[in-house]
Image: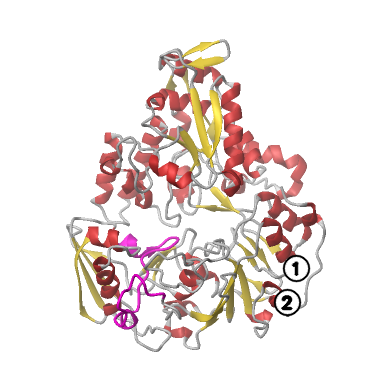
Amino acid sequence: MLVASLLIPALPLSPSSAAAQGIPQNIPRKELLILENPEGTIKNAGWFNIWAINAGSQSNGLQQAALDTLWYIDPEKGLDGAWDNSLAAEKPVYNAEFTEMRVKLRRGLFWSDGVEFSSADVKATVDIQVKNPNMRFSAVLANNVASVEAPDAETVIFKLKKPNSRFHTNFTVRWGAIWILPKHVFDKVEDPAKFDFNKPVSLGAYTLHSFDPDGKWYIWQLRDDWQRSSLGRHGKPGPRYLAYIDPGPPDKRVIAQLNHELDVIHDIAPEGMFALAKQDKGTRAWFKGFPYGHPDPTLPAVIFNTQNEQLKNRDVRWALALMIDIKAVTMAAYRGAATISAIAVPPTGIHPEAYHKPMEAWLKDFEIDTGKSKVKPYDPTVGKQIADMLRPSMGDQIPSDPAVIGNSFGLGWWKTNVTAAGELLTRAGFRKQGNQWLTPDGKPFVVRLMVEGDLRPVMTRAGTMIVQQWKQAGIDARIDVAQGTLLTRRAAGDFDAFIGWSVETWGGHQDLSYFMDSWHSQFVAEPGKSQPLRNWQRWTHPELDKIIEDIRKIDFDDPKGVELGRDYVKLMTREMPIIPLMAYNVFTAMDQTYWKGYPTADDPYANPVTNWGNSRYMFVRLKPAN
């Protein structure tokens, strides 16, 4: 919970108060946009070589302001559509077999040191990393690229080792991507994996001004020749300076914004957002009112370890789903400020139009045979129920328009049905002794639900509520706090179930291959071995493999991709290898004291979350508030 001091109005500081964050005092506040770096204080502050991993920062402005790559897909609508040809002049062109990708580059773009960008830089980005296996993108490039050619300054030809209709996505920013490095700089480096790239040569619209050796802040300055960057096509960025800072723990972030020392908070707890909205009418979030938060294109879910003997049966997984009251979960996790999803696609970006709304009729007709009865588990009114539940206390902050309610709170979810859940468990060979469910071999049915603890309190609260509901239904459910160890335990399969996400999408594009390709059975590890990529549920199914293989054979923009995506939704609903819960709502708070024009649900031209690479599009729309 937030400390009581957050509820005390704070006095705004003078326009020169940027120095309160340790930022150099010679930078005019009216020209400076201050953003939170969610990575906090950076250990190796002077490391800017993003192509090699050495405790440096990616989200200190490096990927948002200084770097660039071939394409971007915004999780929202984008400045001119979600797809943006950035360093590339057009979309990728594949041959019929998807074994060759040709890229036509923009000309007239320059690095900040005056050297013109060309195909040689793209080729060097691949060649250098393939030759140095410990660099960040070396594995994916070595596994896919047979050769790369640069026949002229504006053409790059990738020869692929095997057909891959989605190879271009490696050079397409969602959050980040394979960034293009400057050949003329790395040619002079003996060991590119040990090169700190300090001071970084920029291909973006900003270049490094200064940084704190202790890693608490980084300042980026607009290039004089910003027109010679790919962002320049969209207009001149408003802020002359960007500061990415570590503003401290949640309570200090809120106080800093109330004092106008922090223009954009990356993410705070719902309570912090509520405090800001109440105390400072100049604060703006994604939604103007409740539920405030931006639904990221990620899908928090109960993720089962389907290699666990007790969880292999879909009847058992469905039984656990029918024991959940999603309304209570959203109240516990987000105080109701959540966007629910019954299907295994995040309810954000283009997905409500491509998947959620078109699937409503199928979901309403979807039926489960428990062995004793047939039930239709889907309730299309749950999002409205959450809004109605909040309206008495929140008043006009809660929308009444059904379309707005659907966008804000989501559509439907599964009806709580403990009776049907019991029938499913019985059919699976479980039996109930008193109020306790026993496994087919007569032992208590134990489910450990892993959460991250204080590192992700919203998800921890959701997990705690679900465990409570399972306990009430007779499951020996236990909360399993993996403070600081979730990543390693997740990869090792050391869990029964956990709260997290294995579904991440583009958001602004309907294609689901961002996560789905990694779900193919070819990538599933044996029990006890580390699981690569995103299929943390370790789930395999012949129908899923067929869907993935069919997607691999079609173009990225082929409308058939949506049809295959809907087949995936139906399969996931029938099998329930994860229980989808809601979007990961990020409470990005934007102070309008110095800057206006932030992206919002009313004008969704970009993702406002500060560490995303495509947050750069925000800079060209920001204008001085006064």
Residue ID at (79%, 56%): 5
In the rendered structure, the answer to whether residue 335 lies left or right of residue 91 reads right
Amino acid type of disc 1?
Asn
- The correct choice, above or below, for 228 with respect to 47 in the image is below
Q: Is residue 276 magenta?
A: no
Residue at which label 2 appears: 17
Q: Which mark is residue 259?
A: 1
Colour option used: secondary structure
In the rendered structure, the answer to whether residue 453 lies left or right of residue 102 reads right
Tell me how far mark 1 sits from mark 2, CA to CA.
Answer: 9 Å
- Which of the 4 image quarters holds residue 371? top left
Q: For this rendering, which residue is in front, 228 or 385?
A: 228
- Rendering coords of residue 427 (x, y %): 41, 15
- Which of the 4 image quarters holds residue 158? bottom left
The answer to whether residue 377 shows anywhere in this view is: no
In the rendered structure, the answer to whether residue 162 lies left or right of residue 364 reads left
In the rendered structure, the answer to whether residue 243 lies left or right of residue 178 reads right
